[in-house]
Image (cartoon, rainbow, N blue to C red):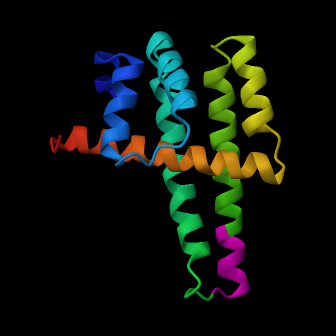
């Protein structure tokens, strides 16, 4: 995680955009999050958010695979995992963005925190972006990059 403190938010974003083959959707929001995390040394909630985003992305992939059949018990477990990790991401996002401006918080409130279908879609797209961040940082840790 210390790697992100050696770069500017813009440099980190550009690295991740390249790593993801231009699949990042929320460039501005990611850059703002990076700025806040770097400036305020918020690695712990950021890592927690990255981990839960990775879990969410995996669960959504499983659910969306039309070949998968789930019995009621297993599907209930998946839904609970999705719910728990979604709340974790929202809470971490609120913690991190709380160090930002009121303007940023109002944007994030409308875009991510209201748990309606549009906000959930936005949040899951952000989780997909954060999953690329997690994969990128894992590659850095393992010495691949």
Q: Residue at x 57, y 56 (%)?
A: 56
The region drawn magenta spans 70-78
Quadrant assignment, res 5: top left
Q: Position of residue 57 (x, y in %)?
A: 53, 58
* Quadrant (top left/top right/bottom left/bottom right) for the N terminus: top left
> Measured along the vertical axis of the image, is residue 68 above or below residue 105?
below
> Measured along the vertical axis of the image, is residue 13 above or below residue 38?
below
Q: Observer-nearest residue: 4 or 43?
A: 4
> Measured along the vertical axis of the image, is residue 26 above or below residue 8?
below
Q: Residue at x 33, y 22 (%)?
A: 11
Q: Residue at x 73, y 84 (%)?
A: 72
Q: Position of residue 65 (x, y in %)?
A: 56, 79
> Measured along the vertical axis of the image, is residue 119 above or below residue 32?
below
User: Residue 35: within the magenta?
Assistant: no
User: Residue 71: within the magenta?
Assistant: yes
Q: Position of residue 111 (x, y in %)?
A: 74, 36
Quadrant assignment, res 6: top left
Q: Observer-nearest residue: 112 or 56?
A: 112
Q: Observer-nearest residue: 59 or 118?
A: 118
Q: Residue at x 19, y 44 (%)?
A: 142
Q: In the figure, is residue 33 to the left or right of 132? A: right
Q: In the figure, is residue 111 to the left or right of 50? A: right
* Quadrant (top left/top right/bottom left/bottom right) for the C terminus: top left
> Please, what is the dominant secondary structure of the magenta stretch?
helix
Quadrant assignment, res 95: top right
């Amino acid at each position: 995680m210390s790697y992100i403190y050696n770069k500017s938010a813009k440099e980190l974003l550009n690295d991740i955009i390249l790593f993801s083959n231009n699949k990042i959707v929320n460039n501005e929001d990611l850059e703002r999050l990076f700025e806040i995390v770097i400036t305020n040394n918020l690695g712990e909630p950021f890592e927690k958010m990255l981990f839960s985003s990775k879990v969410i992305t995996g669960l959504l992939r499983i659910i969306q695979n039309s070949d998968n059949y789930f019995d009621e018990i297993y599907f209930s477990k998946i839904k609970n995992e999705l719910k728990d990790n979604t709340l974790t991401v929202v809470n971490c996002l609120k913690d991190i963005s709380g160090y930002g401006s009121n303007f940023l918080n109002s944007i994030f409130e409308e875009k991510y925190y209201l748990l309606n279908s549009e906000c959930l879609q936005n949040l899951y797209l952000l989780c997909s972006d954060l999953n690329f961040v997690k994969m990128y940082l894992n590659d850095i840790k393992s010495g691949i990059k």
